[in-house]
Image (cartoon, coloured by chain):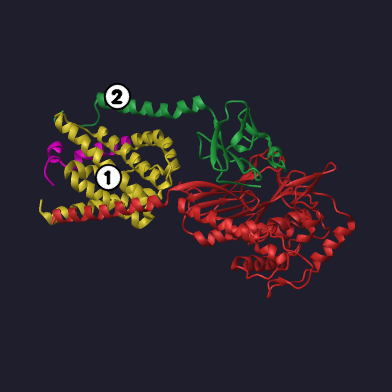
Amino acid sequence: MCKRLLTAASAVFVILAAACGDANSSSDTTEKTIFAMDTAITFKGGREDSQKAAELISELDELFDRYSEDSEIYAINHRQNMELSEDTKRIIASSAELSEKYGSDVNIFSGDITDCWNISSGNPRVPSDEEIEEALRSCNNSSFSLEAMSFADENGSIDLGSVAKGYALDRVHEELGEDSYYIVSSGSSVLLNGNKPDGERFTVAVRDPETGGTLGTVRTDACFVSTSGGYERYFELDGKRYSHIFDLNTGCPSETDLISVTVICGSGIESDFLSTLIYLGGTARLGEYLYSEEFSVIAVTEDKEIYLSEDVDFELTEDSYEIKELSDE
Amino acid sequence: MGKSRYIAKIGILLALASAIQFLESMIPIPLPLGVKPGISSVVIMYILMFMGFRPALVTAVLKSGFVFAVRGFSAFCMSVSGGVLSVLMMGLCLLIFRRTSKDMGILAVSVTGGVFHNIGQLAAASVIAGSIYTISYLPVLVIAGIISGIFTGTIMRILLPHLERKNVYKSSSERS
Amino acid sequence: MNKGYHFVSLKELLIISGVLIVSAAAIVIPELVSGDAEIAVIQCGDSVITADLSQSGEFTLEECGSTVFEISDGKIRIKESVCPDKICERTGFIGSAGQSIICVPERISVTVTSGSDKSDSADAVVG
């Protein structure tokens, strides 16, 4: 009896130990950096997961890069007939939905405006008022039909800059699932998933727009985090700094009193979209977003004031900034 | 001792160890890395000393089974690795005492158990995390193991005279 | 003693204390020696180079398209890059764990990682 018990127990032990070995080999973590979507994207997580994510993002980059002649967005913008992939249809439809829901100040059909500032070529220029006027008109009268997934006339072109990375993170999340531990970080957007090996919550450092150092850290569970700001990507012309984020009302680089907006929520495309939208809106419109139940906001103003949604677990590490409450006006 | 009596005894002791472990996990202790005093290893030590090596090993593994049910697979891996290594090293420690014909030092056994329990857990954690950098935690965990070993050894010292009045040293060499 | 057991003998106590002291030393000594020494991991395409941030100086990496790096006061920056937009040069010096400089055109990434204390560093950086 005793012997049998022992034999059974050791058999169970051996089987479980073998299973242990298996689980471990698949969960060994790795770090991998690829260059796509105009930035460096870093994966932390299982080896296989990282490989899958890297491939997926590279594929999406090929579809969405409007400057590459082989991309589907190029085909749409140049009015070529093409069988579109499910991903292209989805990102366009979701972006349009977000513009509908939150406001069209961020809008993917605004490619003509970025084009007339000639930013992609590396030789930006200030366009004439007429050029801006024309780009604005074409952008506002964009004839894109969501049913046909094409433009009806020559007005408008698509620029997925404000949503592509967020959508890519959503797709990675879809592909790799809820369970495993991985972090995908692309500079302005981050996807955090699963449980950290040490059991702690995730820590995300928010960059100080002035120095490039760390402004503070956010502790969070699995989520998507996106930051928009004009500081890292800007161009200089005649001594004036221009942001890479455009104000679609004026057709000019944005001039907002916010220097950095971080949005934390459960969707990549939404956090990417909202961070740009809130950034463009400035402090004047901050109140509309700060109290939302669907997402959390960290907004930094040019006067070095920080406004937080209530549920953000934020720790300020840079003394020159100050956390403020939004005053009622 | 009859066989069924023997199995029942192990079962009761297993339940006791699991219950102590469970109660211990409910008390929040502000120590890093999930370091616990590990009072349940007093039970394992008792089995090792009074009933022998193999039942101690079996109880340790079965106790980890309880961990698996409550806290999931990676916790189980860590528990089983720590528990088994701990029993192996405590058994070795007893063997050394026996071979050198000295009487057993409780503290030496419990500290060995505590230290190797943590080393076993760390080894499992390193494999799970896929990182050798966790080795930097080793000194901290060794110290934690020594402290918890002193803790459990002291409890053992207090309990031992009440547990069995026969020669512990001899009974540990009985066949299980 | 004839009980068959004892609590602890002097010899055992000495061994335990010895292990305790060695472990404590293993915790304390690296802290004292390295301080907050950090390293920068420079990735250029497929090659990965690590730089010790405690050694100040300038160096050029041919595999990174002749990019010039400078290390000073435990911080690193890209001093000169052949890339067109110079975003990487403007990023300036970085020195705390988790920070990074990215040069997209030249496919260079520089990430500071902490050698000793891992718990401090963030999982990701946004902005």
Answer with left or right where residue B52 lies relative to residue B84: left
Q: Which element type, helix, strand or loop, lies under badge 2?
A: helix
Residue B92: mark = none
Answer with left or right where residue A24 lies relative to residue C120: left
Q: Quadrant of residue A210?
A: top right
Callout 1 amino acid:
Val
Pick whichever, C49 or A289, lies toward us.
C49
Answer with left or right where residue B175 lies relative to residue C52: left
Question: From where the camera sits, is residue A124 visible?
Answer: yes
Q: Which residue is mark 2?
A: C14
Q: Which residues are magenta?
A: B149-176
Residue density around tag 1, few if under 14, some if 14–19, many if 20 or more, within 10 Å: many
Q: Are marks 1 and 2 on the same chain?
A: no
Q: Position of residue C12 (x, y in %)?
A: 26, 27
What is the drawing colour of chain B? yellow
Question: From where the camera sits, is residue A315 visible?
Answer: no
Between the residue at mark 1 and the residue at mark 2, the CA separation in whole angstroms equals: 26 Å
Q: Which chain is red?
A: A
Q: Position of residue A255 (x, y in %)?
A: 81, 51
What is the drawing colour of chain C? green
